[in-house]
Image (cartoon, rainbow, N blue to C red):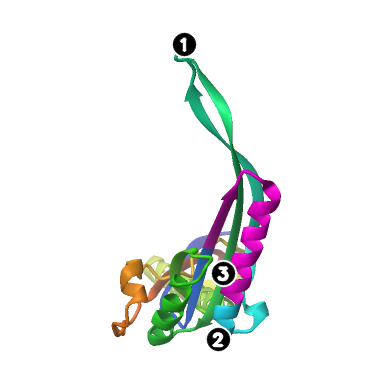
Amino acid sequence: MASVIVKGTGSISVKPDLIRLELEMQTRNTDCGEAMKKAESGLADLIDILKKEGFERDDLKTSNFNVHTEYESVPDENNVYHNVFKGYCCNHSMNIEFCLDTERLATVLRAISVSEAAPQISVFFTVKNEESAREELIRLSSSNARRKAELLCEASGTKLGKLLKISYDRSEMSFVSQARYAMDMNCLRSTAKAVSITPDDIKLTDCAEFEWEIL
């Protein structure tokens, strides 16, 4: 039985509708308990600030929490290096999401910048409904493959028969815009009005392989 195998491709551009802030807070002390206490105090301050900005306590999610020892390489009198205990580091990685609003973004960043926690902040523009975009890509890939198969049959004087097989590997996709948003801490702490921006669209591509019978 003759058949034709075609790879279908679908591509779309999706407008970001969600902002995700990734926050990383580090506290250090030679006493593990004190490092943890400072981390707890910084977190409480951060939560209070976010509540004042209209967030709920559970909106702030933890993605990673760890406490580890730190050492420093120090030379002795013979210039031989040894690891010397430096202290404990408590690392707390968090994230919080809210609807795309660059004015609110600037307000939230300004509030966080003056907090006791003083976390490192990364800003990402993404989408709420990833599955909807995936479904559209699948529909486009299927349509593209069928059109290619029909053209091949037309060019070769044959007809497209029944669908025999579909091969699809659900690949990982980045639903994050390439747009970057960064402001100096001194600017964040000022009262300067934020510049209203429109993040670049998120470019997505997916593919699937189809096999049809040829008549």
In this picture, is 87 found above or below 97? Answer: above
Q: Position of residue 59 (x, y in %)?
A: 63, 78
User: Please, what secondary structure does the residue beneath circle 3 have?
Assistant: strand
Residue that appears at 60% across and 76% down: 47
Instruction: State the CA–CA distance, disc 2 to disc 1.
Output: 57 Å
Q: Position of residue 163 (x, y in %)?
A: 61, 70
Q: What number of labels is visible?
A: 3
Instruction: State the CA–CA distance, disc 3 to disc 2.
Output: 17 Å
Q: Say which residue label 3 marks.
A: 95
Q: Say which residue label 2 marks.
A: 52
For the magenta stretch, what is the residue range? 24-47
Amino acid type of disc 3?
A: Asn
Left-right relation of 107 to 36: left
User: Please, what secondary structure does the residue beneath circle 1 have?
Assistant: loop
Instruction: State the CA–CA distance, disc 3 to disc 1.
Output: 47 Å
Q: Is residue 21 visible?
A: yes
Image quarter (top left, top right, bottom left or bottom right) of the N terminus: bottom right
Left-right relation of 114 to 88: left
Q: Say which residue label 1 marks.
A: 78
Residue that appears at 55% across and 65% down: 210
Q: Quadrant of residue 9?
A: bottom left
Mark in the foreground, 3 or 2: 2
Residue that appears at 40% across and 65% down: 156
Mark in the foreground, 2 or 1: 1
Q: Main secondary structure of the magenta part?
A: helix
